[in-house]
Each structure stands twice: as C-alpha cells, then as structure tokens.
Image (tube, helix red, strand yellow):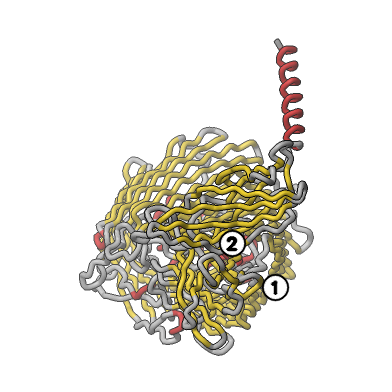
Amino acid sequence: MKTLFSKYTFLLILAATAFSCSDNEVPFDPTVDLIKIDEGFAIGAATKVEVWASQDLMAGYNNIFIALYDSVGGSRITKAKIDFYPEMSMMGGVQHGCPVEEPAEEAVNQLFPGAITFTMPSGDMGSWKLKIEVQNQVNNKKGSTTFSISIANPTAACVKSFVTAANEKIFVTYNFPKKMKVGINDLDVIVYRMINMYEFAYEENYSFVLTPEMPSMGHGSPNNVNPTHASKGHYKGKVNFTMTGDWRLNLNISEGEAVVKDLYFDVEVE
Amino acid sequence: MRLICSLLVFVVVGVRAQSVDTLRTLYLSEVVVNSTIQEGDTLQNFFRANKSATTEDILSRLQGVYLIRRGNYGQEPMLRGMTGGQINLTIDGMKMFGACTDKMDPVSIYIEPQNLKSIQAVLGSDGSRLGTTVGGSVDMQLAQPFLSSQPVTGRVGVGYQSAWNGFNTYANVNYSQHKSAYNLSLNYRKADDYRAGGGEVIPYSQYEKMNLSAGGKWSMGKDTLLASALVDDGWNIGFPALPMDVGSAKARIYSLGYNRYRAHETVQNLNAKIYYNSVFHSMDDTQRENVEMHMDMPGTSTTGGGFVEGNFHPAGKHTLSFRTDYYHNQVLAEMTMYPEGASSMYMQTWPASGRSVTGIYLNDVYKINRSTQVTVNGRIDWAVTTLQEGFGMDQLQVFYPNVQSAYQQITSTVNGKVKQLIRSNWIAEVHVGYGERLPTLSENFGFYLFNRYDGFDYIGQPDLVPEKNWSTDLTLSYFSDQVQLTATGFYNYLPDYIFSRIHPELSVMTPGANGVKIYENIPSATLVGGEASVLANFSKNLQFITALKYTHGQDFEGTPLPLIPPLTSNTTLRYSIKNFNIQLENEIASSQQNVSPSYGEDETVGYSIFNLRSGYKINWNRKQLYVNAGIENMFDKNYHNHLDWGNLPRPGRNINVTIEFVF
C-alpha cells in the first residue's frame, strides 16, 4: 500500500513537472486579451485576414489589430501594407467614411495595430461595412475583403463632433492606452477635421484644459496633466481618478487665443 | 467622574506608605499612578469597586489625563494636550490600534473596568518603555486569574444610570486550584440617548456593548504561564458629534504570557508575551435622517507582536531593567458611496498599509545615597512602514507620484531624572527628556478623511519626518501625616510638530466640506502647563482631595493649538464611618479662549458641577453586598468642556444606583 502510494506520488510529481515544463513552452499568443471581430480572405493577395479588437466595436475610438496569414501555407505574414475603408450606408442613402489610423507595414508582436474612430453606431440609422485592402509584401500581391460590422452605441458618447466658426466639422474622441483605474491614467484625446465624406485630417493646433469631476459629488481630482499634441492628432495627457464611480472629463478646447468648444466625456472607473 | 468611596481609604493608606525611595508617584484625585510596575492592591481594589464607571471615567481622573468626547462613548485619552499617535495607548503592554479613521475607537473602549487590574500612566517622553513617544503612555493592565485558598470567588453586579436609562450588568468568577487558576468575566451595557442638563435629549447618543474575557494561569514553581482572550462587541453606537454612527465595533485580543521570578538569578523578573489582536469597525449612517448619500465605511486593524522584559539583579547601586519588543500593525479602511442613479464609488480611506516596529528599552536606576536617586533611560525603535501596491498606492500616486512601497525610520527617546529628598518631608524631582514619535498611518497615507470638527478632508503625507519633543518637568512634593502636596510644571518644545495645512487648490471629496488639508511637519509647537494636588486627612473619618491640571499649547507663530484642555480642577470631600461613606465632589473647568479658529474651534465657557456619592457595605456570612448610590451633575447644569466635539452638552442630572454581591 505504502509503495503504491509513493509510486503514485512520484508519478504525480513527474506529471506536474512535465506539465510545468510544457507550460513554459506554450508559444506566445499575441491575441490574448483581444476579441476576434471577424475573418475573411483578401482575394488576390492570397491572404487570410483576421480582425481583432480590444473590445466590441463601438462608436468612438477603437484599437484594431489585424492578423494576416498566408491563405495556402497558413504561416503568419508580418510585412504588409494595410488600408482601412470603413463606410456607413445611411437609411436616407447618404454614405460616408470615418477617421482611421492605418497600421505600419511591419507587424508588432505579429499583429498590425491600427485604429478606427466610428463616428456613429450601426442600427436603425444605417449599417457599417469595413473594407480592408492588403498589399502582401511577401508575395507582393494585393487584394481586399469586406466585413459587415456591428458598431455598438456606448452608454456615454465616446466621440463628439462640432462645427467650427470656419464651418469645419471636427470630431473629438479619446482613448485610454491602459484600462482606466483609480490613480494616474494616461489619456489620449484624438481630434480629426473632416475634409469630405471619406477624408479626415489630423487637427494638430488645439490646446486643452482637462478638468475631471464626479458629477454626483461635485468634486474633481488634483494634478491632472492637460493633453498636448504629440503626433497625428493625438494629444497626450494624464487624468487622475481618486475613487471608482462615474467621472466626467471636461475639456475646454481652444486654438491659440480663441475658444473653440467646451465638451465632456463621461467615463466609469471600475 | 464617579468616585468610589469605599476605596479611598486604601488610597490614602497607600499614600502614607510612600517611602522616599519609591519612584515618582503621581497623585490623582483618588488613584495613584506609578511609573514602575507595581502590583498595587490599592489600584486593583479601586477599579474593582468602581462599579458604574467605564474605563474612560477612570482615565479622566488621572493627573495630566484628559478625554476628548464625541458622544457618550468612545472617548479619546489625551495626555497634557497630546493624543493619538503622540501617546502610547497599550493593553497589558500589547500594542493595539483602533480601526476607525475618525478616531471613534481609541482602544480603551474595548476594555471594561472588570477587565482591568490597573492603569499605568506615564507622562511625556519618560513613557517610552512601550514605544518611543513624545506625549507619554497609558498602559491598561488586565486582571489575571489568581491563586487563592478559596476555589470559587467572584462578584455579580447591576447598575442603573437615569440620564441615559442605562443598565450595566456584570459578573466575574475566579476558579482556583492548587497550581492553576481560571477566570471568566462578562459585562453587558446598554444606554439610550442621554438627557443633557435642562432636559434636551441628545439624539444618536445610544450604545450597546458586550464584553467577555477568559484567562488561565498555570504556576510551576517560579515559572508561570498565562493565557487570555478578550472579546468586545459593541453595536448601534451613536456618535452625535459626527455625521455617522457605528454599526458594529468588534475587538478580539489574545495573548500567551510567560513569567519567571527568581530573586537570585541574573535576570530576576522575566516577563514575556506573544499576542494578536484585531479590530473590525464599521460606520453606519442608515439611522440618520436627511443623509445626502448613503455610505459604507468598514475598517480593520490587526496587530501581532511580542515582548520580553525584566530587570537584572542589582549591581552595586545600579538596578537595570530592559524591554525588547516587536509588533506589526496592518490596516485597511474602505469607503463605498451609493449616489442615486449613478455607479457606486469606492476608495480606500486608509490604503492597505502596515508598520513593523522593533525596539529596545533600557532603564537604569542609580541610588547614589539615601536621599538622591538618578534614573537614566532610553529607547530606540526601528520602524518599517509599508504601503501595499495596488489600489491604495495608485490612489496616493495622484498626490505623490513617487510614493514608495516601504519607508524606514529610526526613532529614539532619552530621559534623565534626578530625585532628591530635601529635609525629611520634601522631595524634588527634575526630568529632562528627548522623545520622537512616528507619524500615524493616517497621517502618512490617509485619503480624504473627513474631520467633522473643522469640516476639512484630510490627506496624508508619506514623507513626514518624526515629531520630536524636548521636555522638562519639575515636581515638588511635601509629605506629612496629615497633608500631602504635589506640584508639577512641565515644558515641551516640539520641533517638526505634525499638523495640517489648508490646500485651497484641492477640491473636497466630502459633500459640504470646507476644504482639503494635508498633514505636514510645521517648524515647532510648544506645550506648557502643570498639575497640582492637595490631599488632607482632617480626621480619621474626613478626607479632602483636590487636583488641578492646566495645559497651554501654541504653534511656532504663537497661534493656539486646537483641542487644548482648559484649566480643570477636581475636588472631593469624603466622610466615612464604619460601613457607610458619603462624598461630595466638585469639577470646575475654566473657559477656554485660546482657540484655533482654523480648526473650527470656538471659545468655550467654563462650568462648575457637583456630584454626590455614597456607599454602604453589608457583611453577610463572609460575603459582602455593596450598595452604591449617587447623583452626578446634581444641579442639572447644561455644560460642555472645550474638548467635547460639536459643543455637545454633557449629560444632565444622573441618578445612579449599583448593587454588587461579592462572594
């Protein structure tokens, strides 16, 4: 009995050791913590296209990650030029695009990170399609695939628009590079200027005053850093949350001496 | 407040028995507090007989000791204007820290007089045996089981207080065998809202609590083992001076002790103990009306540690005693607010944080000759304060981006005392000392702690340096058979005094708060004052005791410090004959005009109140029945002391009766 017991114990330990060894050899999964939105084949480029995102796509700034595979061999492709062509078809027949940030041609952690700012949700108003064009740098072939995507309407608006005195339409959105938490948070505010229904430019000349507050309590937080322009319409700042709950990020936008707009985003800190 | 008559006799006898070489003894109106460990039957008897009093009532009578009141419960001890982290408040030498961010639970509330053997109060840096300190120490020594020829002894009692319709019921039993003894005590108190002088009922001043303690003692020749457990549960405790009450306050105290006494060994009296205690405290606003936003505020504080102490065999004219100890305290206080129609809000008002302190204390008594004695003592503490990474640390980074997860500090205390007999009846004693104290975890890491007194939210400061105190005391005493006079003057200069400053640029968290303050070291503060007492035996049956205490405090700019007690006097005239005694007491507090308006203080007028107490003892078959009756605040005066929060009036006329049976 005793021998049997020690034998099994030994086997158990062996198994555990083997398991822990193999554990260490699990290949790095770049899509951990991401969700897959859709996949398809870019006909002509012999490439399988997977669309991943950090959360369900919604009206606002979405971090998008593209995974490419050779559609024959299945191996990953890490060099490609990718273009996003989102398009909203509205019920009344109007069609328009939205601002995008195309990925670099070199993959990061085997994925191509980019971003799309959907300016409205899909639903009764209309539907979104996303065409992705791939220039495969391995076989030097080009092709595209189109996805029908569903864009959720978040509880609090994540993208806001207004028209300037110069009659230009501006979209303002935000992105937390890391999950919001109590404490110090990096905050990106991203601003686009609409050129036409499908073209958007980075707005780089704004300045911001950031004032977070808790509307239910009427208090703010100290030592926030106003977002300032870093590159490509991204303004980087820091926002401090002193407790969990509903916060409002008040942004006073100006250009030079001129006040442009006051707006806010409501966020929930968990 | 409540004097116990039957025991005054013992005190007076104790006073007379003082010999010249007894260490500095402070005379309280009716209690003797000694700076050395003394198995004082006098004290023991006094406290046991103090039938209706709470531990705080006893504390408030001690010389140099004051109480900060926030209601009828949970009063905070203060020594000569110093409180909180400035003093050591210990239980049987064990460190214990309250779990309430609003200081509703100084650990003295978890001890009932039934649990107490004595209270040892040492004022100023001289009180560093239990930790480096600037303000002194109060050690509440717990009653132990005792070996007795009678196997079963004990007492049961019940008391009633009219001003708050309060009942106090208690029982304790000691069971003794040849070499072991066990005790068990139970105490239950319930109080309704109290009635202030003139008839106004103070809402939210009720409380209810239960205290259970058990102990065992096993004697093996010169070695003794001790084990004790104490459970104290309070609930529905109202704090009329605060915006919230206490839903539940639970304390658990466990210890294992070892004692060895051998007169001829190098270490004569060795005492060692390991202990663990925990406090869970939960604030509650569900009973209050017009609450803007409901909130939950639970807090926990756990402390574990141990110590070894003893004294060496006297070498020549020197007697050296030592103590070395370690403790770790860990706290967490949380706040969750529930706004209507929005997400709940959570923060840690005390981020998860802890502190470990290791210290060593040495005390040498050098008897130069029959009339001169020099005492030198010192202590050094090594403290490691830790802030747990995660939520609480992230929070504090908003104010202190470089906040560390660990801080080390070394604090020390040094004291010198000379005691000189002048002629045969006079004793002069001079004390010069230097002490340091650590900032409390609240002062280091507190996060939007709302202080109802000044209406400010307080934020900690992780980089505070220890507060220091350069102090000197001079005491003169005169003894004769009929009279004893004592007068003490003290002066404390406190560099790096820990205070707070308003930061107008910060927005308040608590709705309606006046602003935000952050703790900081100010250049210095000064506390000066004194105590005086007169004890007189007019005849065998008639005794008179009066005691005065005074403190003045100001910061480096001459601005008065907040919460400084006014001049206070307590006077007792007592007549006793056979089994009966009666005494008249008077308590006077002057007005306080040295106030700190920035702390929300206003001037307080003085008052004078009278109490009458009496006691009767019936002997019956070698057992005793004690009946005590009294009237506190006889003339139903509406008054409050400067240390009472929110200018809340104290209880009005209170008729109390206690019946106790001793077997």
The chain to which mark 1 is attached is B
Residue positioned 50% across, 39% down in the render: B148
Amino acid type assigned to the residue bearing label 2 in the image: Val
Residue A234 position in % (x across, y down): 61, 69
Circle 2 crowding by C-alpha within 10 Å: few under 14, some 14–19, many from 20: many
* Residue A193 vertical position relative to residue B529 in the rendered view, above or below: above
Q: Residue at x 57, y 79 (%)?
A: A207
Residue bearing the label numbered 1: B416
Locate residue B280, reporting x and y percent. Answer: 47, 51
Q: Report the Cα–Cα distance between label 1 and label 2.
A: 77 Å
Q: Is residue B541 left or right of residue B419?
A: left
Q: Is residue B351 visible?
A: no
Residue under label 2? A100
Q: In which quarter of the image is the C terminus of chain B?
A: top left
Which is nearer the eye, B351 or A118? Answer: A118
Q: In which quarter of the image is residue B498?
A: bottom right
